[in-house]
Amino acid sequence: MIPNNFEYVRAGSVQEAVSLLSQHGEDAKLLAGGHSLIPAMKFRLSAPSTLIDVSGISEFSGIKKNGDRLEIGAFVTHRTVEFSDEVKNSCGVLAEAASQIGDPLVRNRGTLGGSLAHADPAADYPALVLALAAEIHVSGKSGSRSIAADDFFTGLFETALSDGEIITKVSFPVLDKGVGAAYEKFPHPASRFAVVGVAVMLTIAGGKCSAARVAVTGAAATAFRATDVETALTGNSPDESTISDATAKVADSNDLLSDLFASANYRAHLCSVLAKRALLRAAERAR
């Protein structure tokens, strides 16, 4: 499988990448790790006229703690997230999730920003950014802005990014005492994409759940929050009985995907099973 012909240019900075995107128009694509874009090009599902290589830009390739937030550059690889002590100490669920992405080759090349911009409905990070109330920072010809994770995914392979915008970093909360998070996934055995994945974050105060966020990936056209589960948990003790009741129906099968990997009914079942497991682990971590 051979992609269409394209022009290759290499950007030395985010500003240059933004300028090149503006110059080459909507037929240009950014190349970071390439593990989403290149396969799509080989299958001719994507045929950009220009590839703008941003993999060498160092200014957004770091990880740092900034007050009560953990900032991860868009060009940070999955492997770097997986093994980062800063990530493990500040928001360990991200390292756990990164370790489950694809295989070592994918983790060594694929990037956080690339995964989010591609918005594959079976990717892992979409559930994580939703559950953790992340902020996605972007730059474009009109300047810089941040997009709440709740507003970022707009449809199948669609995001709130405007034409010419680039993800520069993602900001996550530092998980302090009383806050627990977890991620559970039923992976496709070959690709390791999520047939269903569930990420959760719980805040416990005085023995009760004061806040809950539950997000699902792999089950529908885009990642989504299970708000009914969140409501059922909030204000109650996060014990096994409460969690079992809250996760009895995480999603309606009528709203879920059916394909050769799983029926909508089975995905609905997986949503409940995985949400319960993730919530029990998160509750234990928050105590």
Image (cartoon, rainbow, N blue to C red):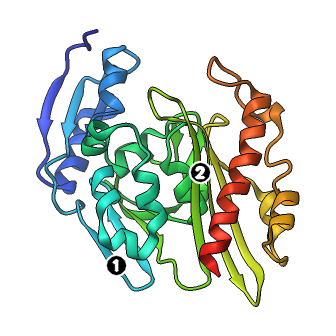
Q: Earlier in the sequence, mark 2 or mark 1?
A: 1
The reply, left or right, for residue 247 in relation to residue 191 is right
Please tell me the numbered disc located at residue 184. Answer: 2
Instruction: Report the amino acid beneath label 2.
Output: Glu
Q: Residue furthest bottom?
A: 206
Residue at 27 percent across and 53 percent down: it is 75
Q: Which residue is mark 1?
A: 65
Residue at 22 percent across and 38 percent down: it is 23
Image location (x, y in percent) of residue 204: 70, 81
124 is higher (above) or lower (below) than 49: below
Secondary structure beneath dot 2 equals strand
Image location (x, y in percent) of residue 71: 36, 70
Which quadrant is home to the N terminus?
Answer: top left
Q: How many marks?
A: 2
Residue at 80 percent across and 30 percent down: it is 265
Secondary structure beneath dot 1 equals strand
